[in-house]
Image (cartoon, grey):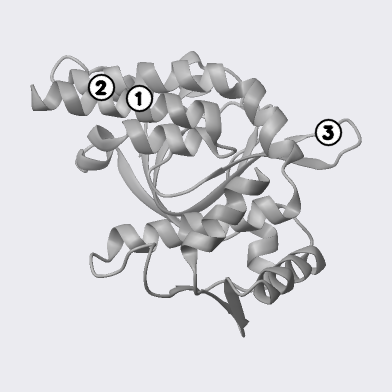
């Protein structure tokens, strides 16, 4: 009964993510990727540096991935040659499974934007595990369904998100990751130290450094953050969260 309740909760969480989040695929993965996170014996683990490309738009690529740490961008190329940010993946995200299983060209380019550790899977090898580990197939089918439903929302939400919304969302997500890894710290009390330069935040949100600096200065004047050399300190995560929801 507890397992059924847990699975129902995961489905509900993924549905909520599909409706509400500009980072929809990452959020849906967080609700459904637990079996993959725990199956550390599957696939192979790789570490990649900032700027490394996992797969390029229009090319075939055999693998799909679980991101265990770091951040990855998913982009498509406009007709004028400019890159369009479609998705940001963080720890716990599963991506690339659709074209990998279908053996189709990649619809997007996926690039590492912060040093990353990933589990890499071949569809053929994973398929053979489904009979012994049906929870893997179940979570993957649900995730594919949610991603299909979220395509339009991602194009409308991520593409049109205002610069301030992108920056605040990223800061809140990193604070949440810190909170999850530190039982003595919560999003409601204590400072969160985000060790990212303005240039790195710009790269991770597909904004210019000038825009990021202007946005951070605005948030600093509102008293919710403080900027230091190569660091952003979130003093009031609750206020930052309220600001984000008010503007989203």
Q: Is residue 16 left or right of residue 1?
A: right
The residue that appears at 20% across and 41% down in the rendered structure is 38
Instruction: Name the front one of labels 1 and 3.
Output: 1
In this rendering, the answer to whether 209 lies above or below 84 is below
**Image quarter (top left, top right, bottom left or bottom right) of the N terminus:** top left
Give the vertical position of 5 relative to 214 (above or below). above
Q: Quadrant of the C terminus?
A: top right
User: Considering the numbered disc 2 on the image, is that residue within a helix, a strand or a loop?
Assistant: helix
In this rendering, position of residue 174 left or right of residue 2 = right
Q: CA distance from mark 2 to mark 1?
A: 6 Å
| Quarter location, residue 55 | top right
Q: Residue at x 72, y 43 (%)?
A: 161
Q: Where in the figure is residue 114, as x and y percent of width and height? A: 54, 60
Q: Is residue 64 visible?
A: no
Find residue 78 and name its label.
3
Mark 2 sits on what residue?
A: 8
The Cα atoms of the two marked residues, 2 and 3, are separated by: 39 Å
Q: Are marks 1 and 3 in contact (CB under 8 Å)?
A: no
Q: Report crowding for label 1: few under 14, some 14 to 19, many 20 or more residues within 10 A (C-alpha).
A: some
Q: Residues within 10 Å of mark 3 (few under 14, many from 20)?
A: few
> Residue farthest to the bottom?
229
Going from the N terminus, do you reach mark 2 or mark 3 first?
2
Residue 123 appears anywhere in the view: yes
Q: Residue 232: percent from the left, percent from the top? A: 57, 75
- Say which of 212 and 190 sits in front: 190
Disc 2 packing (10 Å; few <14; some 14–19; many ≥20):
few
Circle 1 is placed at which residue position?
12
Answer with mark 1 or mark 3, whichever residue precedes in sequence.
1
Which residue sits at x=68%, y=71%?
198
Counting from the top left corner in percent of width and height, residue 208 is at 79, 61
Q: How many marks?
A: 3
Answer with left or right where residue 81 lies relative to residue 42. right
């Amino acid at each position: 009964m507890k397992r059924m309740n847990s699975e129902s909760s995961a489905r509900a969480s993924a549905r909520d993510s599909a409706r509400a989040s500009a980072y929809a695929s990452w959020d849906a993965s967080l609700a459904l990727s637990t079996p993959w996170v725990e199956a550390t014996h599957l696939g192979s683990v790789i570490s990649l540096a900032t700027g490394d490309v996992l797969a390029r738009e229009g090319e075939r690529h055999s693998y799909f991935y679980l991101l265990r740490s770091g951040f990855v961008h998913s982009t498509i190329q406009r007709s004028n040659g400019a890159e369009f940010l479609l998705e940001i993946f963080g720890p716990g995200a599963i991506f690339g499974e659709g074209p990998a299983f279908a053996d189709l060209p990649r619809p997007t380019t996926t690039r590492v934007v912060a040093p990353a550790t990933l589990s890499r899977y071949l569809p053929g090898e994973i398929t053979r595990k489904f009979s012994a580990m049906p929870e893997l197939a179940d979570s993957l089918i649900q995730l594919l369904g949610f991603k299909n439903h979220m395509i339009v929302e991602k194009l409308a939400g991520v593409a049109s998100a205002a610069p301030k919304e992108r920056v605040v969302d990223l800061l809140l997500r990193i604070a949440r990751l810190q909170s999850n890894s530190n039982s003595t710290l919560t999003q409601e009390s204590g400072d969160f130290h985000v060790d990212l330069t303005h240039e790195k935040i710009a790269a991770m949100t597909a904004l210019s450094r000038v825009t990021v600096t202007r946005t951070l200065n605005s948030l600093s004047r509102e008293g919710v953050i403080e900027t230091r050399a190569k660091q952003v300190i979130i003093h009031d995560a609750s206020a930052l969260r309220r600001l984000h929801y008010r503007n989203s």
